[in-house]
Image (cartoon, rainbow, N blue to C red):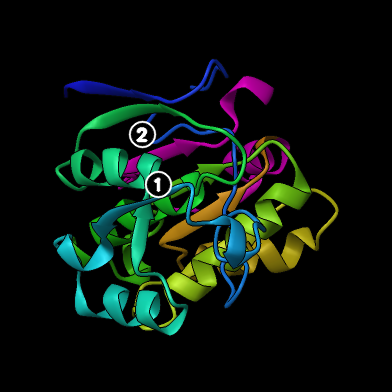
Amino acid sequence: EDEEEVDQTDEPVAKKAKTNDTQTAGTNYDLGGLPSSGLDAILTDDTFASLDLSEPTRKALAQHNFVKMTEIQARSIPPLLTGKDLLGAARTGSGKTLSFLLPAIELLHKSRFLPRNGTGVIIISPTRELSLQTYGVVRDLMSFHSQTHGLVIGGANRRAEAEKLVKGVNLLVATPGRLLDHLQGTRGFLFKHLKCLIIDEADRI
């Protein structure tokens, strides 16, 4: 596949929407924890409504008041929706998490992924905190989708994680160590149908 680079800063990052930042959904703090009064400077005139998104995703975006895209979102989401690999870099608070989550969720939706298909998207984050933040956005964006999602991180109940993985987690957010643990030691964890790998804050992994 063609690889496309989207770089707005000197920060290094690394595969399918590899990033080094997170975006947290919320009514007044939709973009990386920045208050809404400070968002005008980074928002573009491009809207999420202009994208070819599924109805469940559109409903989730509307529910959380996502209307206009930031520059990294406007430049990265369209090529990712077409299946291209992408290397992205942007400053903190620029909305990179949504940039890689929307295309990943749309990929699962269009592929009609079911629990029995196993894991189709894996998002690797360097820390527990970042994984938890990312998973919070995943839950919000997938609230109207039928696909399953899960979180595996160090310090959490491994047995409970394994049981959920065996049942089928279509989109998985994970820290590197715990993911490796499950890849090597959880029988029934199906990942042979993986379609998308996202490395968040790749320069820290």
Asked if residue 150 shows in the view, the reply is yes
Residues shaded magenta: 177-205
Read off the residue under disc 1. 100
Of labels 2 and 1, earlier in sequence is: 2
Whether label 2 touches label 1, CB < 8 Å = yes
Q: Left or right: where does residue 87 sit relative to residue 183? A: left
| Residue placed under numbered mark 2 in the picture | 16
- Residue 56 in the magenta stretch? The answer is no
Residue drawn at (26%, 62%) of the image? 47
Please indicate whether residue 157 sits to the left or right of residue 179 in the image: right
Q: Amino acid at mark 1?
A: Phe
Q: Secondary structure at mark 1?
A: helix
Mark 1, other Cα within 10 Å: few <14 / some 14–19 / many ≥20:
many
Query: Can the viewer see residue 188 in this picture?
Result: no
Disc tally is 2
In terms of depth relative to the viewer, which is nearer, 41 or 63?
41
